[in-house]
Image (cartoon, helix red, strand yellow):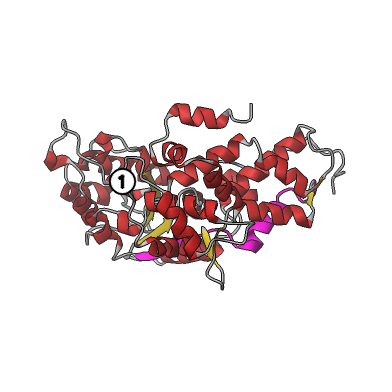
Amino acid sequence: MADKSTARDFVNPYKAGAPLTANDHGVFFGRSKLLKTLLRSIKAKSTEFSSVFGLRRCGKSSIIYKLMDKIDGEIPYAFIDCLALDDRELTIEGFTKLVCSELCRTINNPPPKCSPKTLDDFFDNHLPVLLKGCKQTPVLFMDEIEALDRKRPADIDEDVWLTPRDFYSFITDRRSCFTVVIFFGTPFERLSQGFQGILKNSLKQSVLLLEDKVARDLITEPLKDVLEYEEDAITALIRASGNHPLLLQSLLKKLVDRYLDNKISSSSITASDVGVACNNNSELELALLWIVKGFELSQGILLFAIANACKDNLGASVKEIESHLKKIQEPVGGSYDFILWEQTASKLVEFGYLELSDSSRYTIKQGVVAAFFRDNTLQELMKKCFNEATDEDLDEARELSN
């Protein structure tokens, strides 16, 4: 075991923001049941396709990278990050060309010299040649599928634009030989009817928050030969992050950075050290910006009301929440309709963002999320969370600790 009082020459393994890849296996914990289910479907050459829902920054992309690492060299696959697609790649020709190129990369074939012009052309002429001699059914991983539901630009003809109907045909056509795994971060009821129709026929899975044991392992295991955590520190980290993987990674990254910079003298991490890491933490602020932007408007306003109605961490009663909701006006003016707020609350309980006690009091599970909603006015909240973040917003978040 390393000398815990002097060992400060190691690389910080924690990451804040970017997905965990094969090189980050030391800080990937949990998700074993979901991984086993998806791997079983992939290796069974299932013709059904799987869909995986998870709230923003809960680790969906990290799961894709983990799956690709597990099948790499054994099963060919294509990975499509739908958020990164440009308008030309959202035409039938551009999309099928991209899928072909991705498959060629994993089966070590040269990229195709010409592009399929139609889906029939892709299935009948390109795919059979591409997969000739391939013994395993290839996998098509698609991240942030809702980004495909983009408005057609004026300079692209309607008959070449990839519509939800075209995409559904692409993944379900009898000539298709893909096992398809789709990841999405928009709640099902907010998707367009086209994509709701696609996903309702899938084998549905969810990416939830980390279990307490998994969160504890993420805290204690990666650097167990160098650092140790007092029990109060572990409790403080779990409470502050609420078991959200990105928030926990962000806090741990900050703690370890402070240790490497000699700002924490002892190798035994205390609750006080955790408190300092929660303050003026640019990685944490950026993580919060990303996460909170993923809430629906109604969810964000409800969290704002609950955070401000909670007293001494005892939670907020229905009466207290409704009292705060009555004070809230939409930024554009007019009263917000909160008749169905308890349905919104139920969804947030299901996702793991809220806890409902036996005495019918609501508490925001993530301590830092609660503080974020409590410490910002509603107008600031709207600006930070429900508008598209600009490059200036992200730069400001990164510089908060300077």
Residue type at numbered disc 1: Gly
Q: Residue at x 69, y 41 (%)?
A: 277
Residue named by callout 1: 334
Residue situated furthest bottom in the rendering: 358
Q: Tag 1, which secondary structure? A: loop
Q: Nearer the viewer, residue 236 or 134?
A: 236
Q: Residues within 10 Å of mark 1 (few under 14, many from 20)?
A: few
Q: Residue at x 30, y 35 (%)?
A: 86
Q: Is residue 273 magenta?
A: no
Q: Which residues are magenta?
A: 203-226
Q: Residue at x 57, y 56 (%)?
A: 310
Q: Is residue 153 rendered to the left or right of residue 371?
A: left
Instruction: Return the x and y of residue 346 as percentages of the image width and height.
Output: 44, 65
Q: Is residue 100 rendered to the left or right of residue 276?
A: left
Q: Nearer the viewer, residue 167 or 235?
A: 235
Q: Nearer the viewer, residue 167 or 352?
A: 352
Q: Is residue 224 magenta?
A: yes
Q: Residue at x 87, y 43 (%)?
A: 3
Give the vertical position of 47 relative to 383 (above or below). below
Q: Is residue 294 rendered to the left or right of residue 27?
A: left
Instruction: Quadrant for residue 341, please give it.
Output: bottom left
Instruction: Return the x and y of residue 299 as percentages of the image width and height.
Output: 42, 53
**Residue 68 in view:** no
Instruction: Return the x and y of residue 180 as percentages of the image width and height.
Output: 35, 57
Q: How many marks?
A: 1
**Residue 15 in view:** yes
Quadrant holding the C terminus = top right
Instruction: Return the x and y of residue 170 as percentages of the image width and height.
Output: 24, 53
Q: Nearer the viewer, residue 216 or 73?
A: 216
